[in-house]
Amino acid sequence: MAVRHFLTLHDLSPAELNQVIDSAIALKKAHRENTQQPVLAQKVLAMIFEKSSTRTRVSFEAGMAQLGGSALFLSPTDTQLGRGEPIEDSARVISRMTDIIMIRTFGHDKIETFAKHSAVPVINALTDSFHPCQLLADVQTYVEHRGSIQGKTVAWIGDGNNMCHSWINAAMQFDFKLRIACPVGYEPDATIVASAGDRVVLTNDPAQAVNDADLVTTDVFASMGQEAEQATRLEHFDGFQVNHALMAKAADKALFMHCLPAHRGEEVSAELLEDTSISVVWDEAENRLHAQKALMLFLLNQ
Ligand code: CP
Ligand code: NVA
C-alpha cells in the first residue's frame, strides 16, 4: 500500500479527516481515564525542527510516549541537515530507521521533496505555507464545544499566512464558510483562495468578516521568519485586533480561537484571550496532543 503523508488537509478525504477528529475525541477520553494501551510500542517518531516550537514539540513527543513509542528531536544545528546534506538523502536515511517523521520547516517545497523520498509517513508540523496539524486540533475543539462545524461561518482576522491557508483548506474539507479580513497587501495566496470557490470570501474589513460568525480566529501579525517586519506590520495591521468589541458583532455563543503563541495587545486583547466564556485557546492547545495521536495512528494504520 502507498505510504500516506499529511502535508496539507487535502492529503486526507473529508471522511478520513472526520474519522481522525472522532478518534482524537476518543483518545482524549482514554487519556483522561488512563485506559490507553501502548499500541505504538517500539515505533519511533523523528521530529525535525528548523523553527522554534513549544506546543508542537511537546504534543508530538508526549503523544508518542503515551502511545508506547518514542520520539527523537532533530535540529539542523546538530544534524547533517544543517551542514547541507541533501533533503533527498536525509529522507531516505531517516525513513529507513524510523516509522513516522514530523517536520517543521520554511519552504513547503522542502517538505514535499522530503516526503517524495521518504519510505514512511511524513507529517507537516508547519511550513511557511500551511499548518494542518493545528487545524485538526481547532476543528476538534469546535466540535467538542459546539458540535459539527459543517455549515458554520468562521471569520479569520489578520495575516493571510500559513494558518489562514490551512483554514481555507479546512473550509473545503469540513464544509464551512470562511470570511477572511486582511489589511491590503497581506491577503492569502490567490491560488489557494480560488481553489475554495465561493466557500471563502475576502474583505479588508474585520467587522464585515465577523458579522454573525460562529467562530472568530486570528494569529500573530508577524510569523516566524518575519521578525524584521514586526514594526511595519504593527502599523499596517492597525484596526485588526480581535477584542470584545469585535466579538460583539459575532453570533451569540461565538467562540474565539488562536493557535498560540499570542501577542496580547496586538492581534488579540489580553481581556479576550483570558475570557474563557469565549476563548477556547487552552483547549485548542491541549487538543494538539490528542489530534496528532489520532493522526499518527491513522497514518500508521493502527
Ligand atoms: N501553535 C503552534 O504550533 O505552537 P508552537 O509553535 O509552540 O509549536
Ligand atoms: N503563523 C505562525 C504560527 C505559529 C504557530 C508562524 O508561522 O509563526
Image (cartoon, helix red, strand yellow):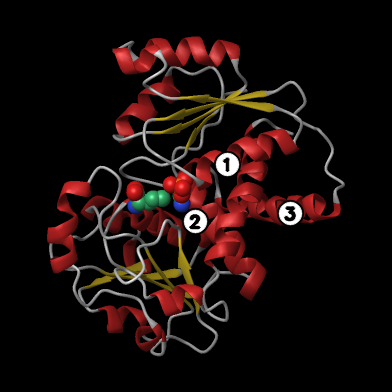
Residue 41 on image: x %, y % = 77, 25
Query: Is label 1 or label 3 in front?
Result: 1
Query: Is label 2 or label 1 in front?
Result: 1
Task: Identify the residue under disc 3.
Answer: 28
Residue 265 on image: x %, y % = 32, 72
Task: Identify the residue under disc 1.
Answer: 58
Residue type, mark 2 in image: Gln
Q: Which mark is residue 173?
A: 2
Query: Is label 2 or label 3 in front?
Result: 3
What SS does tag 2 mark? helix
Q: CA distance from mark 2 to mark 1?
A: 27 Å
| Residue 42 against residue 24 in the figure, above or below | above
The image quadrant that residue 68 belongs to is: top right
The quarter in which the N terminus is drawn is top right
Q: Is mark 1 within 8 Å of ligand 1?
A: yes
The image quadrant that residue 204 belongs to is: bottom left
Residue type, mark 3 in image: Lys
Q: Is mark 3 within 8 Å of ligand 1?
A: no
What SS does tag 1 mark? helix
Residue 62 in view in this figure? yes
Packing grade of label 3 (10 A; few <14, some 14-19, many >=20) is some
Horizontal placement of 302 versus 110: left or right?
right
Q: Earlier in the sequence, mark 2 or mark 1?
A: 1
The quarter in which the C terminus is drawn is top right
Residue type, mark 1 in image: Val
